[in-house]
Image (cartoon, rainbow, N blue to C red):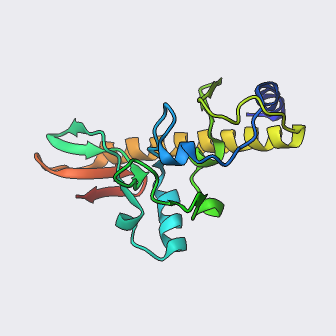
Amino acid sequence: MGVTALRALADKVLSIGFRCTRCGDCCRGLGNDGSLVMAGRDEVERISRMLGRPLQEVAEPYPETVEIQGARVRLGWALLRDEAGACRQYNGNRCSVYADRPHLCRTYPFMLDGDRLIVSECPGIGAPLTDEEALAIARDLLLRQGAEEEDAREIQGRIATAALSSGADVVIDSWGVTPL
């Protein structure tokens, strides 16, 4: 997307308005969207390194499965949630991985579906923001969209070359096939 498209997206964000109230509803799964945070393998690995914990203590396979070659396949990862559905990285009313949070968290409550801007329910919607803040959100949205598109291409390539066993349970992500 060029400068004109970036500007147009920033203008949409500016007209809607947003300021995070730090209520934590999105992290605790209290909104209509829940708190399932899809994250690319690179994002999960970065968080895992930052926390000094193995991937399995940071993320879980995305819960939905598809069947490919008779195998149960999950297409990616989600940050772990506690029994109540809250993100496990949300501790004491703050995000423990804020500086390295996934694209989804950086851009919430906004997301792009193609060229369409989707806005989730959030108490911060409608609050005034500066042009600079709107441009930053628009840049993050475009970065997220590009990363998600690249991840999808990588996963499609992995699926095309995967030799899966019938009955296997695996995650296919941009890094390859991980047996569960």
Which sits in the foreground, 36 or 127? 127
Q: In percent of the image, x 80 and y 32: which residue is there?
A: 10
Which sits in the foreground, 59 or 125? 125
Quarter of the picture containing the C terminus is bottom left
Residue 112 image offset from top left, x and y in percent? 61, 30
Which sits in the foreground, 42 or 160? 42
In the image, residue 90 sits, relative to residue 116, either above or below, namely below
In the image, residue 61 sits, relative to residue 53, either above or below, namely above
Pick out the residue farthest to the bottom: 52
Describe residue 127's horizontal placement relative to residue 47 as left or right: right
Residue 4 image offset from top left, x and y in percent? 83, 29
Q: In percent of the image, x 26 and y 39: which residue is there?
A: 65
Q: In percent of the image, x 74 and y 38: which residue is there?
A: 138
Residue 8 image offset from top left, x and y in percent? 80, 26
Quarter of the picture containing the N terminus is top right
Describe residue 49's horizontal placement relative to residue 18 as left or right: left
Describe residue 75's horizontal placement relative to residue 146 as left or right: left
Q: In percent of the image, x 35 and y 65: which residue is there?
A: 56
**Res. 124 image quadrant:** top right
Pick out the residue farthest to the right: 131
In the image, residue 171 sits, relative to residue 116, either above or below, namely below
Which sits in the foreground, 103 or 158? 103
Residue 49 image offset from top left, x and y in percent? 50, 73
In the image, residue 152 sits, relative to residue 89, either above or below, namely above
